[in-house]
Amino acid sequence: MRHTSVIAALAAIAVSACHKDAPPPRVVVPVTVASVVQRSVPQEISAIGTVTPIQTVAVRAQVSGTLLKVAFQEGDEVQPGQLLFQIDPRPFQAALDQVLANLAKDHAQLVNARQEVTRYQTLVQNDLATQEQFDQFKANADAAQAAVTADSAAVQTARLNLEYTTIKAQIAGRTGSLLLREGNLVPVNGATPLVIVNQIRPIAVSFSVPQKYLDDIQHFNALGRLPVEIRGGDDTTAVQRGTLTFINNQVDTTTGTIQLKATFPNTDRKLWPGEFVAARLVLTVERNVLTVPSNAVMTGQNGTYVYLVNPDRSVRAQDVTVGRSSGDFVVISKGLTTGQQVVTDGQLRLVPGAKVEIKSNGDTTRATAAGGGP
C-alpha cells in the first residue's frame, strides 16, 4: 500500500513537470493582407483651391438719372448685350435735340460764310473789294467751321449720354444682389455698383503650391496642358476635371508658394465663386509600377519593411524601398514582385515565422496567424 502511494506521488510530480515544460498555446491574431499590384500611378500635387470667376463686371451707371426699369431678376443668367437697366432718357434726348439744333444753325452760318469768301475772293481779284474785307470774311468762315466742329463733338457726347441710359450686360454670367430698385436716383460711377455679374461657365480655380514644385510644373506644362482634378469640400466622390491655364510670374516671398489657376467647363454649374475645393494637379503618370497599401509598410531599425505571406502560410519580414505615395497606396521601388501578399493590419503582433491561415474576403484577404507573440 505504501508503494502504491509513492508511485502515485511520483506520477503526479512527473505529470506536473511535463505541464510545466510544455510551451504556452500560440496566440491567434487576425490580420488583413493585400496583394502587390502593378498599376499606373500619377505624379501629382495636392492643394486647397478657391473657385474664382474668370471675368467679373461691376455694373455702374455712366450718367445720372432716375432708374425706370430693372430688366432682370436677382440671380438670373444674362448674355452679352442683354438689357439690365433703363435710366430715364428724356433729359438726355432733350440735350441731344438742343445740340443738333445748334449744329444745324452753325452749319447754315458756315455755308453762308463760305459763299461770302468765294464772292469777295472774286471782287478782290477784280479790284472791287479790299484785301482787308476778304480777310474778314475768311476769318468769319473759319470761326463758323470751328463752331460746327464743336457742335459735332457735342452731338457725339449727347448721343453717348443717351446711349448710357440703356445699360446692357457686357459678358455672359450670373447676376448677384440687386443694389438699386426702380424709382431711385442713379449716381454716376457710384462707389456701390448696381449689380455684379460673374462669369460661371467656364470658371477658374486658384490654388498655390510650394515653390519646390515649380521646375517640375514648368517642365511638364511645356509638354502639354496639365490636367487638374478637384473635389468639393463636402463631396469626395464627384470629380471635376479641367486644365492648368495660368502660372504666376513670381513666387510669393511671404509664403514661398507659386499661384496657379485651372479652368473648368462647369457645364453643370456645380462650381460656385468663393467655394473651397480640394485640387489635384497631375504632372505625369508612371506606368506599371508596383504598389501596396500604405498601411502595409512598417519602419524599423534597418529602414522600411513589410510582412510577406509565404507559400507555406508563414510570414517573413521583407525590406523594401518606398517611392512616393499616391492616395492610399505607396510605390515600391525595390523588394517586392507582382502577386505577393503583404500584411496590412495586425503587424504589431507578428514575428517572422508565424503561420497564417488565409481566408478570402472580396478584394481584401483576411488571415489568422498562429505563433505570433503579443
Image (tube, rainbow, N blue to C red):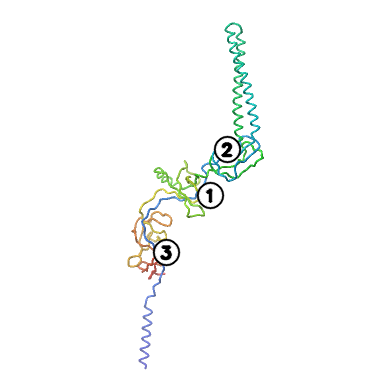
- 18 and 265: which one is in front? 265
Tags 2 and 3 in contact by the CB under 8 Å rule?
A: no
Tags 1 and 3 in contact by the CB under 8 Å rule?
A: no
When the figure is inspected, residue 98 is found, relative to residue 265, above or below; the finding is above
Residue 307's spot in the image, x, y percent? 37, 63
Residue 230's spot in the image, x, y percent? 47, 50
Which quarter of the figure has residue 70? top right
Mark 2 residue crowding within 10 angstroms, few (<14) / some (14–19) / many (20+): some
Q: Can you tell which of label 1 and label 3 is closer to the viewer? A: 1
Image quadrant where one finds the N terminus: bottom left
Tags 2 and 1 in contact by the CB under 8 Å rule?
A: no
Secondary structure of residue under mark 1: loop
Choose the circle earlier in sequence order: 1 or 3: 1
Choose the circle earlier in sequence order: 2 or 3: 2
- Residue position for label 1: 275
When the figure is inspected, residue 374 is found, relative to residue 56, above or below; the finding is below
- Residue position for label 3: 345
Residue 199's spot in the image, x, y percent? 53, 43
